[in-house]
Image (cartoon, rainbow, N blue to C red):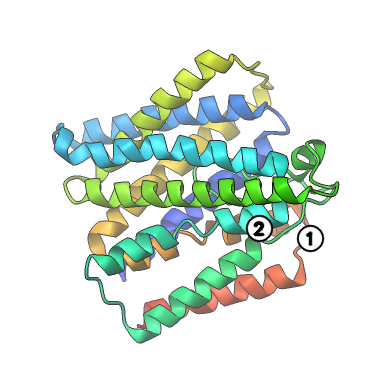
């Protein structure tokens, strides 16, 4: 049960962080949100590791999650490129299947969930895909959170790059390939957390953040985008960084307490959290199929816990 609680805690953290990140892009540029939250996350993770007295576990322990940090940048880049040339309603559900990679890795490593848990996994995964199947709509603030550690896509921003027009078939095929690449890359990130957490869960949290910060810094230095931020956005950016990094730590701890195949799926239900927050706090609409997906996800979680 502890593994289930930790994995669901990670989903709540990722989903809340994605929600706040998407909301904050109305007060700051996307790059300001990314740079600020990454910096806050790095400082927070470093303080936790230092205060806990966890020394350097060695490169042999940390390299998987640091490689995962590189994969996360690949995932985010492919995801946004896919959104730029394809339809959000196609790209987001594909990207949200990233938990299938660690699920399969766990099974290949010999994990054997019960029949009830496997049924719960199938139900929860189907529910998440339904929740992520949303078209960009004018007037909405928060879109689909298809990747953890990344602000939920703002529908207006996607409309601005052309998602409301007819997407050429060739572009849609390219977008599907990019979305699949994003899903695989983010799945490998979760596998990296599991591998490093076997040695030290806190260093899994810190190592992944160090890696992503370094790569984002290099991309930022090369692209030199303009940073725009209102003062009112600063507390939200701090919250996003702490929520995302805390969620990373909870997921790493969850992998030490239960099957990777189970906790990866439970950790992937963050899109449901983001959509429910947008509905509850902003009164944004939930499509009927998304509501069905949310209930299906909850039913899947209940089966997993009962199994």
List the single residue furthest toward the front.
170
**Residue under label 1:** 285
- Look at the picture and state if 111 lies above or below 133: below
Q: Nearer the viewer, residue 26 or 165?
A: 165
Name the outermost residue toward the bottom: 115
> Who's the residue at 67% across and 26% down the image?
29
In the rendered image, residue 73, in percent from the top left (x then y), is placed at 47, 35
Total labels drawn: 2
User: What is the secondary structure assignment of the residue under circle 1?
Assistant: loop
Identify the element where label 2 is drawn: helix
Q: Earlier in the sequence, mark 1 or mark 2?
A: 2
* Horizontal side, residue 153 vs residue 205: left or right: right
Residue at image location 79% in from the left, 48% down from the top: 167
For residue 256, which quarter of the picture?
bottom left
- In the displayed structure, would residue 41 be above or below residue 287? above
Q: Are marks 1 and 2 in contact (CB under 8 Å)?
A: no
Image coordinates of residue 38 in percent, x first then y, are 46, 30
Q: Which mark is residue 199?
A: none
Instruction: Give the number of the disc on residue 275.
Output: 2
Q: Is residue 36 toward the left or the right of residue 304 in the image? A: right
Q: Residue at x 50, y 56 (%)?
A: 12
Please name whichever residue, 275 or 119, is drawn nearer the observer in this view of the structure.
119
Residue 142 visible to an observer of this rendering = no
Q: Locate residue 223, reporting x and y percent.
A: 58, 17
Residue ID at (36%, 59%): 102
Q: Quadrant of the N terminus?
A: bottom left
């Amino acid at each position: 049960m502890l593994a289930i609680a930790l994995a669901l805690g990670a989903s709540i953290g990722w989903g809340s962080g994605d929600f706040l990140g998407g909301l904050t892009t109305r007060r700051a540029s996307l790059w300001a949100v990314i740079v600020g939250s990454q910096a806050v996350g790095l400082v927070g993770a470093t303080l936790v590791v230092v205060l806990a007295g966890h020394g350097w576990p060695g490169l042999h322990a940390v390299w998987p999650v640091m490689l995962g940090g590189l994969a996360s940048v690949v995932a985010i880049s492919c995801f946004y490129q896919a959104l730029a040339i394809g339809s959000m309603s196609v790209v987001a559900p594909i990207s949200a299947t990233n938990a299938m990679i660690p699920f399969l890795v766990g099974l290949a490593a010999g994990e054997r969930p019960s029949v009830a848990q496997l049924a719960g996994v199938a139900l929860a995964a189907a529910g998440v895909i339904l929740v992520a199947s949303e078209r960009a709509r004018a007037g909405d603030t928060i879109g689909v959170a298809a990747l953890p550690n990344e602000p939920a896509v703002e529908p207006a921003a996607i409309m601005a790059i052309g998602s409301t027009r007819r997407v050429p078939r060739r572009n849609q095929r390219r977008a599907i390939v990019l979305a699949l690449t994003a899903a695989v890359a983010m799945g490998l990130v979760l596998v990296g957390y599991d591998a490093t957490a076997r040695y030290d869960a806190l260093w899994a949290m810190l190592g992944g953040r160090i890696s992503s910060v370094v790569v984002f810094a290099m991309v930022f230095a090369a692209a030199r985008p303009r940073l725009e931020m209102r003062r009112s956005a600063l507390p939200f950016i701090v919250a996003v960084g702490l929520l995302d990094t805390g969620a990373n730590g909870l997921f790493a701890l969850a992998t030490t307490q239960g099957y990777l195949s189970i906790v990866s799926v439970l950790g992937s239900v963050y899109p449901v959290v983001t959509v429910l927050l947008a509905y509850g706090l902003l009164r944004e609409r939930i499509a009927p199929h998304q509501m069905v997906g949310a209930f299906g996800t909850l039913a899947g979680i209940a089966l997993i816990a009962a199994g």
